[in-house]
Structure formats: structure tokens, C-alpha cells
Amino acid sequence: MKISLYQRLAITLCTAFMIMASLLIWWSNSLVQQSKYQAEQKLHLHLAEHLAHDNPLLQDGVYDKAALENLFHTLMLLGPAFEFYFLDTQGNILTYSADPAKIKRRSVSLTPIKKLIEKPQKTPVFGDDPRGINSSKIFSASPVYQGDLLQGYLYIIIGGEIYDSIFSQVQDDKNLQKYGAFVLASLALLLLILLAVFHYFTRPIKALAEQMKALKAVGYDQTKVQLKQWGNKSNHGIEHNEVNFLGASFNDMVLQINQQLSLLTENDRVRRELLAHLSHDLRTPLATMQGYIETLAIKGDDLSSAEKQDYLATVQRNVKQLKRLIDQIFELAHLENGQVTVNLEAFAIGELLHDIMAKFTLKAESKKITLTLQPQPCQFMVFSDIAKLERIMTNLLENAIRHTPDGGEITITVTHLITEVRVSVTDNGSGISKEDIAYIFDARYRASNAIEDNTQHAGLGLAISQKLSRVINSELMVKSELGDGSIFSLSIPLLP
């Protein structure tokens, strides 16, 4: 059987409370009893001395047993709280006032008697009780002399048998019992209050433990469990108590873990989709190459020279396409793994853009596409990684030419901002639908364009460009409408 935290605390508290209450009661009773003994002994400290000096029978030091018994009996009637004993010089009991049947000792130790006589301020001092073998009592004592000769000691027990009997009856009085019951009830009420306080402070911990248990039962799926709200934060952003802070932190941790799991799940889905697309794209050129190579191997002697050259040219085109796709896959993998270094340097952005445009002049002319740079005298000095920026702009221009129809226009615009320049690539091509624009940077085989083309391409250019832009602390942005062309832009810091 499992015991909760509150139950363990309650058991510990009750045990500790009972032990402390018992010790307190014992200590209180001991202190009261000790104080009572000390007060009574000091009050009657000189009782035996006065009786020894004032009584004629003891004043002369003459021992008369019958007369002393009669005297002690009379004194006990006058003071029932006392018992009177006459001892010889060895401590032997010669005469006493108690019931003979109840006397258990025939002698008592003289050590405490001498101690009290020599040092009366050291109270309480306990002497042997003749009515018990192992019991002791407070007493008053005085030596009895005949002249200078010590005859014995007058030994008076304070609180004798009659006193003990009456005191025991008083302790059994109902009023005292009621008082004791009231004290016990007060202690029990205090214990209940403490248990309630413990329950109040441990209840949030129990709730947090139950929430953790419920979350574990559903496989840590936050959508299947209603998380408890753990209070409000103070002005300084700190929870009002530690349990609320712990609960709020646990909720934040659960939400973050679920977000990360969702992200991992989505990434896994994208990777599977990418793998399916890439597998298809890899299979197509390989199958084409295999078919033409087998044809050349089987019918090589029957083919004309022109047919062989055509077959080899087809194989070569597929090899280039396959190599380009594999290169882009490796490039994307390096970017996702962070295996890339940034080499920042100062350069003229206009010169770089002119060089990039020169690479696409023939391709643009083949489609009668006009390539322009605005402004023409572009002399801005920027501070970035020239190789990665060239890769981004190359991908953007290649993508723009692919989706721009014959006779279209592509414009590269450089806009001066305060601390940076914005480079934009604008085309009047097929554009991108609103439903697909959010996915064009996904690492998939083809961008989700609404208009397909027959140009062979890997389809990873935009994904690579987006990751490269983030490497150089920029962000590739896109504005597009289906049928109205697209604008891709990114910002580059100016040279300080």
C-alpha cells in the first residue's frame, strides 16, 4: 500500500507531537514536583531543630521510648503530614510514630541527614523512607545532644503516608480530571490544526503529482490532459510560491516537449515525402540511362552513327541531371546539419549581380526574356559572404527564368535602406497560388507551383536558398499571386 506525502507527514507529525507532548508533560511534572519538594523542605527545614530544642524529652538528650512514642503520636495528630523517627548515632530507628506494620526499614542512611544539616541551602535533599525499601522522601532532621555527647537524630519525614493518601485523593478529584481533559483536548485541537495546515500546503504537491501521473498514462500527450493553471506571476515574473512555480514550469516544459515532438513528427513526415520524391527523380534518369545503354550494348552494330550520338547525348543529359540532384541533396544535408562556415567580406553588390546576370544571358535570350538591374550604377558596398550570396541569387534567377514565359521580364532591384540594402528578383511569370506559397521553401522535389513546366530541375533550389539566407543572418521573403509573377527578396548589411 502506497502512502502519500501528506500521510507520511501526518504520521511523522503525530509521532513527533506525541513524543514532544509526553516529554513536555514529564518535564513539567518533574519541575512541579521538584519545586514542590524544594519549597516544602525549605518551609520545614528547621522543624526538627525546633522540636529537639523546645521539647523537654529531647532537650536533655534523655531517651525514653514510651514517652517519645507518646510525644510522636501527639505531634502526628497535630501534623498528619509528618512522620517522626528517633535515630541513634548509627542510623538505627529507635522510636517512630508510624504504624509498625508498615515500617520496612530498621535503619536509614545518615549521609543525606548530615548533608542537610551541614548544607541546608542545598535543597531538596532526599532521605531513606522507612516505609519503603527503595523509596526516598524529603525530610527535616536535627542532632540530639546530651551535653556535648551526641545521642542520636530527630528524623521527620515531610509528606508521610497520610499526606500521600490525601494528595492522591485530591489528584483524583473531578475538577482536576476536567482540567487534565481540557489540556489534552487543547493539545488534540492543536494537532488537528497542524494537520489541516499540512494538508493545505501539501494539496498542490498532490495535485501536481496526479497531473504528472495522468500525463504519463497518456504517453505525455498534452492534448489528452487538461493541465492545471498554477496561479499568476508577480510583477517580477516570479511565482508567488515554490509549488506554483514548479507547476507552471512543468506546464511550460510539457508544452515545449509537445511542440518539439510535433516538430519532429512533421520533420519526419517531410523527410519521408522528400525521400519519396527524390527516389522518383533518381529512378527516372537512371532508368533512362539504363535503357539507352542497354540499347547501345544490344543493337550497337545495327545503329547508325547519328543514332549512337543521339543516345549518348541523352545519357549525358541524364548523368548531368543526376549529378546536379545529388549535389543539391548533399548541399541541403550540410546546411541542415550546420556543417557550413561563413566568410564575411566587403564587396560591391553591383559587380556580383552583373556577373550572375552574365551567366544567364544566353538562357534568357533563348526565351527572349529581358534581364535588367536597377539602378544601373549600383555602387553599394556590402559586408557578407559573397559565395553564399552568389549561390542564392543564382538559384533565384534560375527559378525566375524557369517560370517566366517567352518574352517576359525579370528585374533585379537594389533598394538602399538605413543600414542595409534589399535585393529583389521580380518576374512576370506563372506566380504561386496562395495555398502553396507557405510551402515553397520546403525541401521537396518540386516547389508547389500551380503551373508545371517541362524543364528538368531538382526542385531543391528554394529550400537551399532559404537556409543559406539564414546562415548569413538574413531571411528570404516572397510575394506572389497566381498568374501575376513573383518577387523574391532578402536584405544584406551595408559595409559599416
Image (cartoon, rainbow, N blue to C red):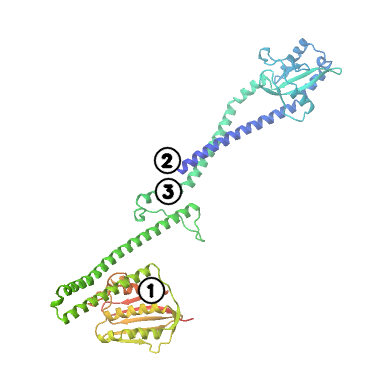
Depth-wise, is mark 1 or mark 3 nearer the camera?
1
Please tell me whether mark 3 sits on a helix, a strand or a loop.
Answer: helix
Q: Is residue 392 above or below residue 229?
A: below
Residue furthest toward the left? Answer: 302
Q: Which residue matches tag 1? A: 468
Instruction: Tell which circle, 1 or 3, labels the residue nearer the N-terminal end.
Output: 3
The answer to whether residue 451 shows anywhere in this view is no
Tag of residue 2: 2
Element under disc 2: loop
Mark 3 and mark 2 lie on one chain; the one further toward the N terminus is 2
User: Residue 65 is drawn in which quadrant?
Assistant: top right
Residue 138, position as x, y percentages in the image: 71, 24
Q: Nearer the viewer, residue 421 or 206?
A: 421
Near mark 2 (Cα within 10 A), the count class, few <14, some 14-19 or many ≥20, is few
**How many C-alpha atoms fall within 10 Å of the one at disc 1: few (<14), some, or many (≥20)?**
many
The residues tagged by marks 1 and 3 sit, at their Cα atoms, a distance apart of: 46 Å
Tag count in the figure?
Answer: 3
Which corner quadrant holds the N terminus?
top left
The residue at which mark 3 appears reads as 209
x, y percent for residue 495: 47, 81
| SS at circle 1 | helix
> Does 212 sit left or right of 127 as displayed?
left
Contact, mark 2 vs mark 1 (Cβ under 8 Å): no
Residue 219 visible (yes or no): yes
Rendered image quadrant of residue 362: bottom left
Q: Give how far across and how far down residue 265 sits, in percent.
A: 33, 61
Who is closer to the viewer here, 123 or 306?
306
Measure the alpha-carbon separation of dots 3 and 2. Answer: 14 Å
As displayed, is residue 117 above or below residue 231?
Answer: above
